Image (tube, rainbow, N blue to C red):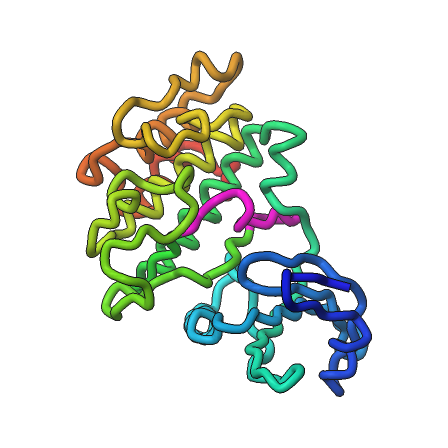
Amino acid sequence: MIEDATFYLTLDEVDDLFDNYSVVDTLESGAQGFVFKVKKEEEELFLKIYKPGMTIRAEREVEKLKELDSPYFVDLIDSGSIQIRDKNYYYAVTDFISGENLKNVIKVRQLKDFEMKKLIVSMCKAIDQLWEHDILHRDIKPANIMKTEEDFILIDLGIAKHHDLSTITKTGMVVGTPVYMSPEQLTARKNLTIKSDLFSLGIVLYEAYTGQHPYGFNYTVIGRINPKPIKSAKLNFDNKIANVINYLLKTRPIDRPFSGKEVIEYLMEGDNSAV
């Protein structure tokens, strides 16, 4: 059973809602909704049921997934509305990712150099692909990255925003996870660019590489002080990886890379191991 203050779902109840999916396990419950592992014949999939009041956000996430055809995002299989106890709920079914959440990985250990290069390349490509569709993710953090045997996958487009569309939040409202936000996102600046997502990636990379948050998990100092130098946070480090992280964490957007491609080209110059 999953409980949420005034609402809960049992596995049997969810199983009865769908004729073509059988529920295997409960995976997660959070602010957005409930995630289940389901099967369609022999294929394993993710089923996400969004909580009441999340329909607009859910529909936006689904629309963005429809636009993206990339190995760095989950594939959308199915979506729609279902009725549970006289209320409408939105759901989405995506392919199943066999891997581990990056948040859980870095709780246990720091990523090795070859893993860092894969993380940098895959996330830079994902951010670039979003930007090609005029989309900002706005919540890049370890919990929204899955580590598979081959690569890393960016998940949860729930608060992503089309750059040319109005937001569903109020003007001046800060949306996202503050300790992974860029200085301009923290101040609710309008017209954020790809450089904001790249800054957030820099925080993730720093934490994955050193085991420490560059600002000590204190969002109030982001943009006000420089991050702790990598050389003082990690004994042995790769200069290129450190330079990439430092470049992404520049306080002023104008001082950061213009694209993920720029980062990848620097990282891979004379080195094919990051492919």
Q: Position of residue 36 (x, y in %)?
A: 70, 66
Residue at 64% x, 61% y is: 4
Residue at 38% x, 17% y is: 229
Which stretch appears magenta? 139-152
Residue 256 occupies which quadrant of the picture? top left
Residue at 64% x, 49% y is: 148
Instruction: Tell whether 24 sits left or right of 83.
Output: right
Instruction: Tell whether 143 sits left or right of 69.
Output: right
**Frontmost residue, 198 versus 6:** 6
Q: How many numbered marks are there?
A: 0
Instruction: Tell whether 41 sits left or right of 234.
Output: right
Q: Is residue 143 magenta?
A: yes
Q: Position of residue 147 (x, y in %)?
A: 61, 46
Q: Position of residue 139 (x, y in %)?
A: 42, 51
**Frontmost residue, 208 versus 47:** 47
**Frontmost residue, 187 versus 137:** 187
Position of residue 260 relative to residue 15, above or below, is: above
Q: Is residue 144 magenta?
A: yes
